[in-house]
Amino acid sequence: MLSTLAGLTRPLGLAVAAAVVVAALVALTSGSEPGEDRPTRWRMVVGMALAPVGWVSYVAWVGARRGSPLGYLEIQDQWGNGFDGGWAFAGFVWHWLTGPGFVAGLGPCAAVAVVA
């Protein structure tokens, strides 16, 4: 339910939905836990199905408002946002690492290292 609400606030809520789906898949495929009953498994499946509903609803709403199924992507393009494979991020970090704010450039590098 909270994943659905997260998706309604921002499309980045899809990341929350993905986490819910992955966690449920791991739980469902790892075998039964002692005391786990069928209703618990059923609730996980329903949760997996509902997790992305907020995101889908948000993107559909934006598309309806724009009159295009790709309305959200069109807005992102107008803002200059898009997927570039990480080049913009690399340029941002490089700017800080080669300038007077070297220490500020270490922060994103550390964050990427922790995630990796």
Image (cartoon, rainbow, N blue to C red):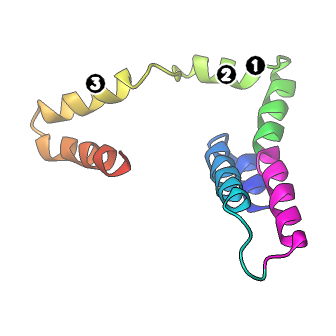
Q: What amino acid type is highlighted by mark number 3?
A: Gly
Can you tell which mark lies on residue 52?
A: none
Report if the CB atoms under discs 2 and 1 are less than 8 Å apart.
yes
Q: Nearer the viewer, residue 12 or 63?
A: 12
Estimate the spatial distance between the alpha carbons at disc 3 and disc 2, rounded to whole Å.
23 Å
Q: Mark 3 — residue? A: 91
Determine the residue positioned at 51% across, 22% down.
83
Which sits earlier in the primary sequence, circle 3 or circle 2? 2
Residue 84 in the image: x percent, y percent?
45, 19
Picture quadrant of residue 62: top right
Determine the residue positioned at 74% across, 70% down.
32
Q: Secondary structure at mark 1?
A: loop
Magenta stretch: dominant SS?
A: helix
Q: Is residue 57 above or below residue 86?
A: below
Can you tell which mark lies on residue 70?
A: 1
Q: Mark 2 — residue? A: 73
Estimate the spatial distance between the alpha carbons at disc 2 and disc 1, rounded to whole Å.
5 Å
Packing grade of label 2 (10 A; few <14, some 14-19, many >=20) is: some
Packing grade of label 3 (10 A; few <14, some 14-19, many >=20) is: few
Q: Is residue 35 magenta?
A: no
Packing grade of label 1 (10 A; few <14, some 14-19, many >=20) is: some
Which sits earlier in the primary sequence, circle 1 or circle 3? 1
Q: How many marks?
A: 3
Q: What amino acid type is highlighted by mark number 1?
A: Leu
Q: Is residue 22 above or below residue 59?
A: below
Determine the residue positioned at 32% across, 44% down.
112
Q: Nearer the viewer, residue 5 or 46?
A: 46
110 with respect to 41 (left or right): left
Tell me the quadrant of the picture where the N terminus can be found.
Answer: bottom right
Q: Nearer the viewer, residue 34 or 92?
A: 34
